[in-house]
Image: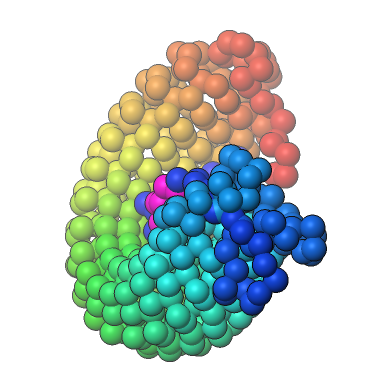
Amino acid sequence: MTLSVVPPLITLTFFLLFSSFPAEAIPSKADTTARTFADWCLNKANESVEIQHTINVLLLKAKTQDCHQADKFLSTSTNLNLDSNQIADIKPLSSLASLTKLSLIKNQIADIKPLSSLTNLNVLYLGNNQIADIKPLSSLTNLNVLYLGKNQIADIKPLSSLTKLTGVSLQKNQIADIKPLSSLTKLTILLLDFNQIADIKPLSPLINLTGISLNNNQIAEVKPLSSLTNLTELWLGNNQIADIKPLSSLTNLTGLWLFSNQITDIKPLSSLTNLTLLSLNNNQIVDIKPLSSLTNLTFLALGSNQIAEIKPLSSLTNLNFLYLANNQIADIKPLSSLTNLNDLSLANNQIADIKPLSSLTNLTALHLDSNQIADIKALSSLTKLTQLSLGNNQIADIKPLSSLTKLTALWLYNNQMIVDKTCPVKPESICSFLPPEGD
């Protein structure tokens, strides 16, 4: 069983608490911007089904069916959370000018023109809707935080005027051109994952950035990032990056994700001694000597590379998590010093001798599938283990595992030499002599 590695999220996200308070009401068939919520509410019967639904949601927020009382409450509210309410038409929100925080995540909104009048907004969440045109946002010059993830946005020019922004999320859109972001020099957090970005030059003036996520784009050249020396978190997974020299200047980094690229030379990382989390899964790395200086690392993922020699890891004694699956490792002696490890994956390598693991008594999860292991006596000292995977090896005797009484899952599939398939720990259901589904 191989371990699926999801790098821990030291989150590049916005943490906002919205108080759900309602507003006022009065009817009229005047132009949208002149109408109060009471106008919309009292005229509800003549409105579209979508508008009626929005009015009903707002009345619920106001905890009253009285249009005037609701209007009074909503028109003075500063925070409003309308997430996951199946809202499609937001015209009734256009008069709520007191709002400073508004969240409309996970609705069915395409047209955001009614928001253009809400110029007091500091925080706006519009993620997971059907928005393509963001021109109406250009008037919201007081915005500090803007969340537009999971929409259909390609053109971000309207954002160029929002120079007070400190946090922007645009992940999972259709963005290729990020030039309009170059004027947003107050940005500290920027999320651009899952777009179509190749050229990141416009990011070079954004020297206040502390976190940026660019996973799943089409980036090959990372030189423009070299000026961003305040960065503490950088996500560049699943791009087309081979040369990481420009990253050597980013010495404040504590988290760096470079999985699924085309990296062979990791020498530039040796200067990044503040790193605590580093993901390099799925590259073409052979030589890991440059990692020996990164002694603050607690999380290191090196799966699916071409690594055989792991001596440089012996100095990384702060490691809690180490992922080395799918490499060419035979000698694991250098791991014996890593006594703080909790989670270790060595699946799909060329390991026969596992004696060096006997000192790793803090391990709670150990994955040794698909190696050449016959003797497992060394594991008997690892009494904190809760998960142990030994499938696809050459094990005959599983009795040494009887001391591992904290196990909740033990995989022993495809060890043809096991004659006595009695589970060495109780209950029997902990043991699996069959491959996991999907393997």
State the residue lying farthest toward the top: 426
For residue 318, what is the image quadrant?
Answer: top left
Q: Residue at x 50, y 51 (%)?
A: 72
Count of numbered badges drawn on the protein: 0
Q: Is residue 193 visible?
A: no
**In which quadrant of the rendered image does the C terminus lie?**
top right
Instruction: Judge whether residue 16 is colored magenta.
Output: yes
Q: Is residue 201 magenta?
A: no
For image coordinates 54% across by 79% down, the residue present is 136
- In this picture, is 367 found above or below 115? above
Left or right for 39, reference 161 = right
Whether residue 335 is visible to the viewer of this picture, yes or no, is yes
Q: Nearer the viewer, residue 384 or 378?
A: 384
248 lies left or right of 347 = left
Q: Quadrant of residue 250?
A: bottom left
In the image, residue 278 lies at what x, y percent? 35, 57
Image: 179 above or below 248: below
Q: Measured along the vertical axis of the image, is residue 24 above or below residue 395? A: below
x, y percent for residue 171: 52, 68
Dividing the image into 4 quarters, which one contains the N terminus? top right
Foreground residue among 243 and 179? 179
Magenta stretch bounds: 13-18
Q: Which of the two residues, 154 or 142, is positioned nearer the viewer here?
A: 142
Q: What's the residue at 56%, 68% (across, down)? A: 94
Horizontal arrangement in the rendering, residue 309 relative to residue 24 (left or right): left
Q: Residue at image x 63%, y 50%?
A: 67
Q: Residue 168 at what x, y percent from top left?
A: 42, 69
Q: Main secondary structure of the magenta part?
A: loop
Q: Which colour assignment does the render follow?
A: rainbow
For residue 7, above or below residue 390: below
Left or right: where 324 falls relative to 189:
right
